[in-house]
Image: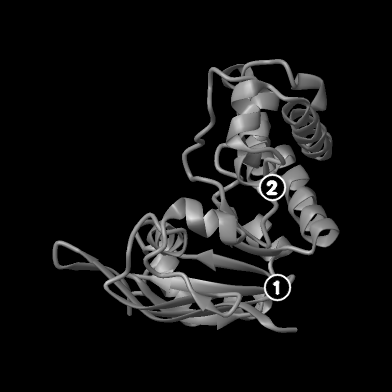
Amino acid sequence: MSLIMEINNLDKSFGGLSAVLNFNFCLEQNELIGLIGPNGAGKTTVFNLITGVYKPDQGSIVFNGQNIVGLAPHTICARGIARTFQNIRLFNDLSVLDNVKIASHKNVPYGFLSAILRTPGFFKGEDIIEKDALKYLKIFKLDDKKDELAKNLPYGEQRRLEIARAMATKPTMLILDEPAAGMNPQETKELMKLIAQIRRDFKLSILLIEHDMSLVMGVCERIYVLDYGQIIAEGRPEEIRSNKQVIEAYLGEELE
């Protein structure tokens, strides 16, 4: 397999405090890897650097052979990287269907003039977008809720809607920021199956941040462990589970 993303020597500080330091990382095509670490380790900062929310102080982020450092978030999304957020960010007062349709903005099959004049091409394009959105809602078992307002969905379904919206951008790399947060064990188990399914069916590369170890160990092929902004371990789930440095980072050192 070939690399879809390679990050080298990435640094980011806030007011003299290093949030990410000398971060190195690689992701292959169709690979599913995890990024874990204690609270405050810098995991979400890494996501924000990859997606253009923050600009690194140093280092490179190469996606499909091109350095994307300095690009705007919408440009990075257009290049093929989609993400979800630790705190759900839906358009609460729009319908479930419209939340997914709005993600198709970069793929609209009509021009600005067609939209203003409401040409036949506009209506044909809108029909294509709606059918595409309904396809994703069906995959995420939300098609029967398409006309409900997003804010009225139960928490677990809001999480699924956010992933469906990310998928509607047609990414080649999907970044999931704690998708199981707030879910009960049954919802988490279903989410685990769903992540494996979308990776398989859409041939996606997936980077996952998650505190739920059963989810991480159950779906990820490789895991990076971050502590105080630095990678302290990398390997297969069984290697990470027994790594002494990782155990100390989460639980502290054993007193003599």
User: Which quadrant would residue 139 be assigned to in this image?
Assistant: top right
Residue at 63%, 81% in the rendered image: 239
Which one is in front, 66 or 145?
A: 66
Q: Which residue is mark 2?
A: 167
Q: Position of residue 12 (x, y in %)?
A: 29, 69
Side of 238 relative to 240 (left or right)? right
Scheme by which the image is coloured: one colour
Residue at 83%, 37% in the rendered image: 135
Is 223 located above or below residue 174 in the figure?
below
Say what secondary structure mark 1 lies in: loop
User: Which quadrant would residue 96 be assigned to in this image?
Assistant: top right
Q: Is residue 124 visible?
A: yes
Q: Specify the amino acid type for callout 1.
A: Glu
Q: Which residue is mark 1?
A: 221
Instruction: From the image, state whether disc 1 or disc 2 is nearer to you.
Output: 2
Which one is in front, 157 or 76?
A: 76
Side of 209 relative to 126 (left or right)? left
Q: Position of residue 222 (x, y in %)?
A: 64, 75
Q: Is residue 243 visible?
A: no
Please tell me how crowded label 1 is: few (under 14), some (14-19), or many (20+) other residues with Cα within 10 Å.
Answer: some
Residue at 69%, 38% in the rendered image: 110
Q: Specify the amino acid type for callout 2.
A: Met
Is 91 located above or below residue 43 in the figure?
above
Location of the N terminus (image quadrant) = bottom right
Say what secondary structure mark 2 lies in: helix
Q: Position of residue 84 (x, y in %)?
A: 55, 47
Is 180 located above or below residue 121 in the figure?
below
